[in-house]
Image (cartoon, coloured by chain):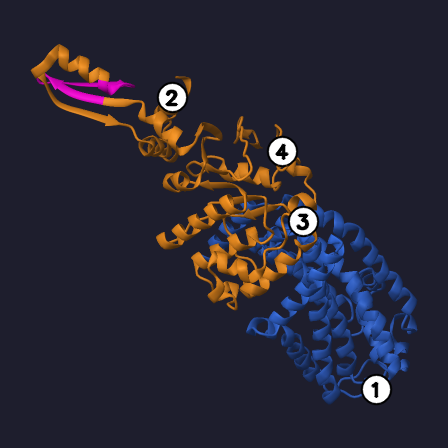
């Protein structure tokens, strides 16, 4: 068999094996359910509130927005985290030591991280069926929109995760990425519409993928007339594809370069040195 | 090889033939790992030429990589995987690189048997003991039936039984499968047991090279003779202690007392070297032992 095809298949199997492992330990299971718990608490606090200018439940608006945020967390932070951890424990170096191993490794990670993100979406969606009114879950059109928003969201966020994961060597520095993302959440209208923010802040929010991930998910799951209270009074699908597509292209151009540079520098003594530092942190 | 302004390896000349076991022996910090990482293609030398299986490791392609096996010093990866699962998965990558002469990968059951992990095939990697984990590392290193295998400090943390089993495995790989093996160790006894050829590294230089036998004979050449004559102590170093003693006794006869002849063993010489490296006090004495012999 052609080595590349062989490595792609091995990578696919790798993703499935690692995915299976996530169902068998408490820490990974908690990661699946944690966002849902946060979401339920948020929705509980919002009970009785409505989206400004409508009588639509604010909680029901928050659910799809949070799903968009989940894609960013899952795709970007998920992959970045995996890369940082796998570099520290030597998984990446192992991949480098076997033929076509890096290709297989990367395919495996993409499969794993995407699957985990999708499972996360489904888990968060489920309580919405029982607690929230007004979501268009029975409408085939909603699923059709999800079918392009979710993959596009992952393609926009995964390569960025690969870039960030390659640049960060110390797991503790992941905070440098997480903090700005929290700022971005407030700015991007995940938990509350941003119509009231100054125009320039709205502009800033719309440069980043998070706003569009939330908007795309809302466009799929909320009734059509809620588009009226979004910026520009529409779901702006064209712009969503444009901005998320631009981030995807940027990521896909940068990721191979940065990944290759990172992988080239990996060696046994670097892994050992990192381990030494990790031990000092623990000790 | 250079870190910043400090050269950590100088003029390391090393050639290994097929089926040969070469040991890089030296104290910590001697440059063993650096040497092996250059050969593995994980690190670029600042100068010099390196050919491994006919290619420059810095430019080695996947086909080249498939012919190598690598066992590094410390692995902690794939903790959530099961032993058999991991070996089967990593073996899959080698399948397209099999040849008529060398079918790849090594069948998993046979491999588990070879490294003595059959009973742990279903265990999680993170649950293995240190010695089992190391055997798994070796299994991963040889799953692709490498023509050239690098082992970096392979037996650190082994108990004596595991060490002996591992030594048998190395002999088997070299003798039956004609695998060329380059290993690093700071344990002289291990190098003597395993290697066809030992290269002793200190301060980034090869200070001695030869079969365990040759090295032992070289060092043994210099003996130290001590005696007293008329209550006074004397010490003399000589390559031919027997002849020296004959003359000494013929000349002074009964006046010689407390006669003592000490042959420097390979171990003495190596320990002196390690001591110098570790204390940082380089009297050069240890190195001179090797040097003298090389010049003779």
Marks 2 and 4 sit apart, C-alpha to C-alpha, by 29 Å
Marks 3 and 4 sit apart, C-alpha to C-alpha, by 22 Å
Viewer-closest of A202 and B222: B222
Q: Quadrant of the N terminus of chain B?
A: top right
> Do the dots labelled 1 and 4 sit on one chain?
no
Q: Quadrant of the C terminus of chain B?
A: top left
Q: Position of residue B11 (x, y in %)?
A: 54, 26
Q: Which residues are magenta?
A: B225-242
Q: Colour of chain A?
A: blue
In this rendering, position of residue B213 left or right of residue A81: left
Task: Tell me the residue that label 3 is attached to.
Answer: B99
Marks 1 and 2 sit apart, C-alpha to C-alpha, by 88 Å
- Of the numbered discs in the image, which one, if any, rests on residue B293? 2
Marks 1 and 4 sit apart, C-alpha to C-alpha, by 65 Å
Describe the element under mark 3 as helix, strand or loop.
Answer: loop
Q: Position of residue B156 (x, y in %)?
A: 42, 49
Question: Mark 2 vs mark 3: which is more N-terminal?
Answer: 3
Mark 1, chain letter? A
Which secondary structure class fits the magenta region best? strand
Q: Are marks 3 and 1 in contact (CB under 8 Å)?
A: no
Marks 3 and 1 sit apart, C-alpha to C-alpha, by 56 Å
Residue mark closest to the camera, 2 vs 3: 3
In this rendering, position of residue B254 left or right of residue B170: left
Describe the element under mark 2 as helix, strand or loop.
Answer: helix
Identify whether A183 is placed above or below A23. above
Task: Tell me the residue that label 4 is attached to.
Answer: B51
Identify whether A109 is placed above or below A90. below
What residue is at 71 percent from the left and 70 percent from the top? A115
């Amino acid at each position: 068999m052609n080595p590349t095809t062989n490595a792609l298949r091995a990578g696919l199997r790798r993703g499935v094996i690692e995915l299976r492992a996530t169902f068998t330990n408490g820490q990974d299971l908690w990661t699946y359910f944690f966002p849902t718990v946060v979401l339920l608490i948020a929705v509980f606090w919002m009970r009785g509130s409505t989206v400004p200018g409508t009588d639509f439940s604010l909680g029901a608006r928050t659910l799809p927005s949070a799903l968009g945020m989940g894609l960013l967390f899952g795709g970007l932070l998920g992959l970045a985290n995996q890369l940082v951890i796998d570099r520290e424990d030597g998984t990446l170096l192992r991949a480098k030591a076997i033929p076509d191993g890096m290709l297989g490794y990367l395919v495996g990670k993409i499969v794993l991280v995407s699957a985990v993100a999708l499972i996360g979406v489904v888990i968060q969606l489920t309580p919405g069926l029982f607690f929230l009114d007004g979501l268009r879950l029975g409408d085939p059109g909603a699923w059709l929109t999800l079918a392009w928003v979710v993959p596009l969201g992952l393609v926009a966020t995964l390569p960025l995760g690969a870039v960030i994961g390659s640049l960060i060597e110390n797991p503790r520095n992941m905070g440098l990425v997480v903090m700005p993302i929290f700022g971005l959440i407030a700015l991007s209208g995940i938990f509350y519409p941003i119509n009231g923010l100054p125009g320039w802040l709205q502009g800033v929010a719309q440069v980043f993928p998070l706003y569009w991930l939330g908007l795309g998910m809302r466009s799929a799951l909320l009734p059509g007339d809620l588009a009226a209270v979004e910026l520009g009074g529409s779901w702006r699908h064209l712009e969503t594809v444009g901005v998320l597509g631009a981030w995807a292209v940027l990521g896909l151009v940068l990721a191979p370069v940065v990944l290759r540079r990172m992988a080239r520098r990996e060696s046994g003594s670097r892994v050992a040195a990192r381990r030494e530092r990790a031990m000092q942190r623990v000790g | 090889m250079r870190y910043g302004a400090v050269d950590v390896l100088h003029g390391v000349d090393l050639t290994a033939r097929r089926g040969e076991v070469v040991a890089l022996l030296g104290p910590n910090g001697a440059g063993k790992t650096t040497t092996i990482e250059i050969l593995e293609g994980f690190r670029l030398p600042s100068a010099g030429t390196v050919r491994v299986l006919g290619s420059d490791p810095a430019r080695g392609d996947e086909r080249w990589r498939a012919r190598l096996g690598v066992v590094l010093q410390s692995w902690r990866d794939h903790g959530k995987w099961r032993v058999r699962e991991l070996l089967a998965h990593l073996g899959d990558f080698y399948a397209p690189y099999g040849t008529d002469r060398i079918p790849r990968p090594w069948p998993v059951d046979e491999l588990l048997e070879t490294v003595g992990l059959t009973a742990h095939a279903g265990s999680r990697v993170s649950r293995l003991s240190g010695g089992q984990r190391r055997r798994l590392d070796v299994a991963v290193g040889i799953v692709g039936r490498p023509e050239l295998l690098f082992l970096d400090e392979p037996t650190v943390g082994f108990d004596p039984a595991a060490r002996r089993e591992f030594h048998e495995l190395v002999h088997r790989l070299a003798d039956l499968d004609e695998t060329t093996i380059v290993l690093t160790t700071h344990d002289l006894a291990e190098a003597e047991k395993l290697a066809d050829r030992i290269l002793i590294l200190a301060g980034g230089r090869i200070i001695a090279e030869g079969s365990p036998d040759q090295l032992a004979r070289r060092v043994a050449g210099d003996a130290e003779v001590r005696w007293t004559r008329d209550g006074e102590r004397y010490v003399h170093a000589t390559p031919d202690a027997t002849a020296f003693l004959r003359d000494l006794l013929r000349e002074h006869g009964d006046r010689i007392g407390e006669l003592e002849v000490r042959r420097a063993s390979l171990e003495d010489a190596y320990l002196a070297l390690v001591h110098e490296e570790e204390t940082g006090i380089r009297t050069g004495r240890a190195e001179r032992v090797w040097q003298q012999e090389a010049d003779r």
